[in-house]
Amino acid sequence: MNKVSSAKILIVDDMPDNARLLMNILSRKGFELICAYSGQMALELLQTVTPDLILLDVNMPGMSGYDLCEIIKQNRSIKDIPVIFISALHDLQNIVHGFALGGVDYITKPFQLEEVLARVNTHVSLHQLRKQLQIENQSLQSQLQQQLNIDQNLYEDLSKAIQRQELELYYQPIVCIDNGKIDGFEALLRWHHSRRGRVSPVEFIPLAEQTGLINSIGAWVAQESMVQLSRWHLNYPHIMISINVAGNQLLDPNFFSIIEKGINTTGVCPAQVKLEITESAIITDVDRAIQQLQQLRSLGLKICLDDFGIGYSSLSRVQDFPIDVIKIDRSFIQQKNWTIAHIIALLADSLNVCTIAEGIETVEQLKKLREMGCDYAQGFLFSTPLNALDATNLIAKGSLAVDIFQR
Ligand code: C2E
Ligand code: MG
Ligand code: MG
């Protein structure tokens, strides 16, 4: 910021000689100068110009420098302009009074030219910096506000999404790692927003969790996936369904009856329904979560620990979790973090639970996980998530991507 010398300074002094002297020094340094010979005249000027600094003589007939400063500091549009007093009165009391009125500095007469310049430079720089910060702050605030508005709009739209039938479940196959046979599907939520198009669950699930909408959305997901499963079971009775469950949902006292109702109304076999829970969902209230999971399991449901390994804080208690399946988080697979993936597979084995490797995109990844003794696989290598019709067609075809499994 090198605009200091082009700053505008208002000199207020009833003595023309003094004013001229100050103007001489400062104009040579490139400052833009305006001069007023009385407090009244300064006030009039301040209605049309906004200087970056005011050099104000204290001792003037009529309105003194102190009086003028008081008026300036009460006026919202000019109160932030720094005021430097210039006065022959150099007793402490006067100086303190000047600061009390809001002056930023006090120069005593007779002054040294260097001193005046140094102080003017300092305060002009500070003032310009403050103005710059204010502008940046305002723009940050308006950005923040905009974001809040967007979220508010998104929230309102999301709260109407079920009723407007904008939600849809997609299904991604989970295959047997040895032969590629479809074991079941993970239900993944899709939101088709009328204006924004597709909104990713990564964006709206956290919003739903924060606002409590997850309970009604989650109830819809559970019911809808079980209805779909019951349709598949008419022809393909072995298919499983995996339903994602958010943390707050698990702790919701109504959750159990929502799941129970889903099972009763659709008639699906509970052993073919897996609930996918993340570690973070459990650690909020471990004991309550364990109790809730035990109750769900007593209905016959399977519990799957999703995204395992990234929330390692629960590692010490994982053996207490009533689970049937562990899903190795896709980040380990995609970053080729085979050591961790292997440790998780071994852990699952010792806990006597199955493993699903998620996010398999290449044959190399598939082979590695098969070597580790993983049971099931899921990922773009086999299929992206599909709508119900395409998923049904895929089951009808039987196993998929057979050539991958022959290699
Ligand atoms: P998740 O439960 O871990 O689901 C797996 C995510 O990985 C899905 O993303 C899926 O499309 C993606 N994926 C699958 N295979 C691959 C692959 O090979 N490569 C890559 N890069 N990604 C793959 P999606 O559908 O965007 O869902 C993201 C997350 O949103 C889910 O992660 C889950 O936490 C949440 N979510 C989705 N549907 C629901 C729901 O109905 N309820 C709740 N509570 N959460 C949901
Ligand atoms: Mg999942
Ligand atoms: Mg996952």
Image: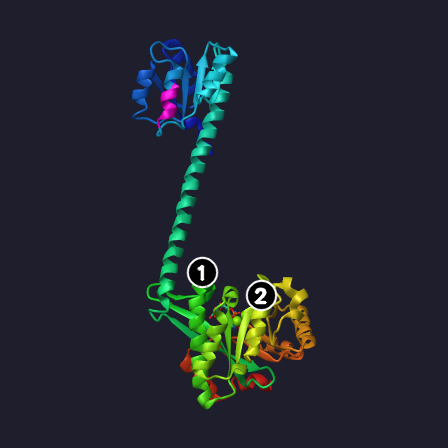
Dot 1 falls on a residue whose secondary structure is: helix
- What's the colour scheme? rainbow
Dot 2 falls on a residue whose secondary structure is: helix
For label 1, the crowd category at 10 Å Cα-Cα, with few meaning under 14, some 14 to 19 and many 20 or more, is some
Q: Is residue 212 magenta?
A: no
The boundaries of the magenta stretch are 69-75
Comparing labels 1 and 2, the label whose residue is closer to the camera: 2
Residue at horizontal 40 percent and vertical 52 percent from the top: 148
Inspect the image, locate mark 1, and give the three-letter code of the amino acid beneath it. Answer: Leu
Identify the main secondary structure in magenta.
helix
Of 111 and 198, the residue lying toward us = 198
Which residue has dot 1 on it?
Answer: 207
Real-space Cα distance between discs 1 and 2? 24 Å
| Residue 393 in view | no
* Disc number placed over residue 288 in the picture, else none: 2
Residue at horizontal 48 percent and vertical 29 percent from the top: 126
5 over 87 or under it: above or below? below
For label 2, the crowd category at 10 Å Cα-Cα, with few meaning under 14, some 14 to 19 and many 20 or more, is some
Viewed as shown, does residue 191 lie left or right of 342? Answer: left
- CB at mark 1 closer than 8 A to ligand 1? no
| Residue 87 in view | yes
Count of numbered badges drawn on the protein: 2
Inspect the image, locate mark 2, and give the three-letter code of the amino acid beneath it. Answer: Arg
Residue 407, percent across and down? 60, 85
Residue at horizontal 31 percent and vertical 16 percent from the top: 40
- CB at mark 2 closer than 8 A to ligand 1? no
Residue 157, percent across and down? 36, 62
8 over 258 or under it: above or below? above
- Residue 403: name its quadrant: bottom right
Which callout, 1 or 2, points at the residue further toward the start of the chain?
1
Residue 199, percent across and down? 41, 65
